[in-house]
Image (cartoon, rainbow, N blue to C red):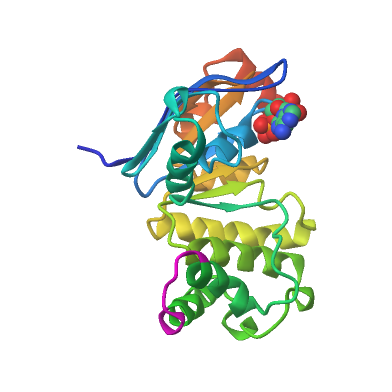
């Protein structure tokens, strides 16, 4: 049996009158990369934010590994918040802009979460953080401050910081869209490495060529539903749906 790491069923979310997610379903096996494509406003970011419970869905079930939350039946008050927090802890989110702590060194940016939120011993956390910095090619920047780094380096620290919390799933929300073009490649290379090292990732990106290389599956979203799902060869190379074709003609 495949080990399904992410399973989303009937996910719905409205902001006021606006139905942003109108029943999103998908699953992702462990160790795979899922790329979300779709026009601006189709709900891609809201899907990621729902998985990380930065937005609380109105309905639907989200399961990440062994934690499952049915948002249609979320208990009110403290019990509901505790369920949401358990699900949130399953994923790490990398945002468009890194939002690192400006007055902490690179190493302290990585160790803060595991030590303070997860109450893990500092020496162990520091050792792991150094391995992660090495992985993202920044072993020599441990004692630098964020302002001393390029945008691409800052974003790589942001990725290492998400990994330091040992999430089951890493979510990337347009991780290169705030970068100068010449810095995009180094960040995409790090994300690609993670995917090949067995991390389970979900990536919202406009970099279609990158999506083709890194994705095990591509979800094409439009109007708050998954219109098409398949391998990059299927969805990008030979789309079935007219909406997907129209989108790809515009962006390629
Ligand atoms: P995408 O990532 O595909 O561009 P989003 O998930 O960011 O789409 O947004 C989908 C729609 O939901 C957009 O119309 C956006 O304006 C709206 N939206 C997202 N977040 C909020 C919010 N907090 N309040 C009101 N509207 C929102």
Ligand 1 location (quadrant): top right
Front position in the image: 27 or 46? 46
Is there any visible trace of residue 40 in the rendered image? no
Residue 75 picture location, percent across and down: 44, 30
Tell me: residue 52, above or below residue 140. Answer: above
Query: Which residue is pictured at 49% across the width and 62% down the height?
Result: 163
**219 inside magenta stretch:** no
Between 17 and 32, the residue placed more toward the observer is 17
Q: Can residue 165 be seen in this view?
A: yes
Q: Is residue 114 left or right of residue 112?
A: left
Tell me where residue 169 appears, x and y as whole percent: 44, 50
Residue at x-position 48% and y-position 69%: 114
Look at 45% across and 54% down and name the residue there: 195
Q: In this view, does 24 lie above or below 118?
A: above
| Among the 4 quarters of the image, the one containing residue 73 | top left
Residue 118: within the magenta?
yes
The residue nearer to you, when weighing 215 against 36, is: 36
- State the image coordinates of residue 245 (x, y, percent, origin top left): 63, 20
Residue range of the region highlighted in magenta in the rendering = 117-124
User: What's the residue at 40%, 52% (across, down)?
Assistant: 168
Residue 91, relative to residue 53: is it above or below? below
């Amino acid at each position: 049996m495949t080990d399904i790491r992410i399973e989303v069923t009937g996910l719905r979310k409205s902001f006021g009158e606006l139905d942003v997610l109108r029943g999103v379903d998908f699953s992702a096996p462990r160790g795979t990369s899922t790329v979300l494509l779709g026009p601006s406003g189709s709900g891609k970011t809201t899907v990621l934010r729902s998985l990380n419970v930065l937005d609380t869905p109105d309905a639907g079930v989200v399961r990440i590994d062994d934690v499952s939350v049915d948002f249609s039946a979320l208990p009110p008050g403290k019990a509901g918040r505790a369920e949401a927090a358990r699900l949130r802890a399953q994923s790490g989110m990398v945002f468009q802009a890194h939002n690192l702590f400006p007055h902490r060194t690179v190493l302290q940016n990585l160790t803060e979460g595991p030590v303070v939120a997860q109450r893990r011993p500092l020496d162990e956390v520091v050792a792991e953080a150094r391995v992660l910095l090495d992985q993202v090619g920044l072993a020599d920047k441990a004692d630098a401050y964020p302002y001393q780094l390029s945008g691409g380096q800052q974003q790589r620290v942001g990725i290492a910081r998400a990994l330091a919390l040992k999430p089951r799933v890493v979510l990337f929300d347009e991780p290169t869209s705030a970068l100068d073009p010449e810095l995009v490649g180094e960040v995409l290379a790090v994300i690609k490495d993670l995917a090949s090292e067995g991390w389970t990732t979900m990536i919202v990106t406009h970099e279609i060529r990158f999506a083709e290389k890194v994705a095990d599956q591509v979800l094409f979203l439009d109007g708050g539903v998954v219109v098409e799902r398949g391998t990059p060869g299927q969805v990008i190379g030979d789309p079935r749906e007219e909406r997907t074709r129209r989108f790809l003609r515009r962006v390629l």
